[in-house]
Amino acid sequence: MRAEGVLDLRGSVADQESNWHDRVSDDVIHCTGGGSYKYAEMMHNFLGVQVQRTDEMKSLIFGCDFLLRNNEDESFTYHHEAIGIERYQYKPIAADSIYPFLLVNIGTGISVLKVDSPSKFQRVGGSSMGGGAFIGLGNLLTQAQSFDELLLMAEKGDHRKCDTLVCDIYGGSYDNLNLPADLIAGSFGKCSRMGKRNARGDHEQASQQDIAKSLLLMISNNIGQMAMLYGMRFAMKRIYFGGFFIRKHPITMRTLSYAINYWSKSIFLST
């Protein structure tokens, strides 16, 4: 439900309770993110509350610090080859060794934060190719109506029907550059001539599930590579991934882990 719908619903409840505005007129709601600006006036008009904005990145870092210090199961590594719950290997971090770390926050876009302490951090980079690009392109290329539906499609897809692999170019692996045969050389590379091949009947058509899988890998591989490069630049031992894009979905964690597995182990935030 969009914010406007939620506020309409709460507004209806408020109208039915005569003392609603008396009870909440002095209340303050602490908010962060773009919505704290976009919906501040609307929340005041509908609910009679004041919006107190807090800095988004400060809130994010303070929240990470609190959870990493107080919740032993807050961070974990993901191991796709394991079975069931064993895929999630939780990594308690000693309070005196939490910092420094790199935080890759994946929402609509991506922010890469170098964090030295709760009060000392900086945004060192980012990208527009995040969750917004994934769901936006997914809606254009498939009939998926939501983020979760697009991920379910990707789970069932075969990206090899869309992507050009190293073996498609060299007939196998490219040993001189240590490139395995199944490495993606070009995302959606096979789609460039798919129409002509389908017309000749000599190429299997890609399904919406295949397209979703290729799209997810394209986004995730770029995020993983970016995280790896920033981690190397700042000599970080730990990289945390968080944000709406992940939400503990196995396929997103698997693709991100694979993307940087040859360099280091990635650690995810459970919330």
Image (tube, rainbow, N blue to C red):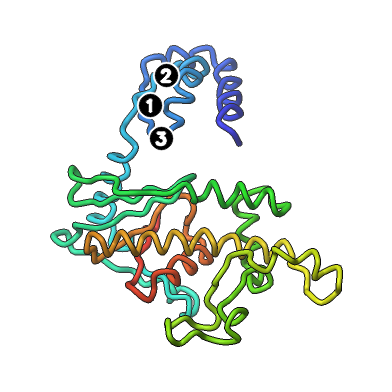
Separation of marks 3 and 1 at Cα, in angstroms: 13 Å
Residue displayed at 18% across by 63% down? 94
Q: Quadrant of residue 50?
A: top left
Q: Amino acid at mark 1?
A: Ile
Q: Amino acid at mark 3?
A: Gly
Separation of marks 1 and 2 at Cα, in angstroms: 7 Å
Residue on which the image places disc 1: 29
Residue displayed at 37% across by 61% down? 268
Q: Is residue 264 left or right of residue 164?
A: left
* Quarter of the figure with the N terminus: top right
The tag on residue 14 is none
Q: Counting residues from the N terminus, which is met first, the one under dot 1 or under dot 2?
A: 1
Give SS at disc 2. Answer: loop
Q: Counting residues from the N terminus, which is met first, the one under dot 3 or under dot 2?
A: 3
| Mark 1 in CB contact with mark 2 (< 8 angstroms) | yes
Residue on which the image places disc 3: 33
Above or below, 3 relative to 184: above
Q: Nearer the viewer, residue 131 or 32?
A: 131
The spot of residue 139 in percent (x, y) is 67, 48
Dot 3: within a 10 Å radius of its alpha carbon, few (fewer than 14), some, or many (20 or more) residues?
few
Q: Of discs 3 and 2, which sits in the foreground?
A: 3
Q: Amino acid at mark 2?
A: Val
Dot 2: within a 10 Å radius of its alpha carbon, few (fewer than 14), some, or many (20 or more) residues?
many
Q: Is residue 254 left or right of residue 63?
A: right
Residue on which the image places disc 2: 49
Give SS at disc 3. Answer: loop
Residue displayed at 86% across by 72% down? 200
Above or below, 174 relative to 147: below
The spot of residue 53 in percent (x, y) is 34, 27
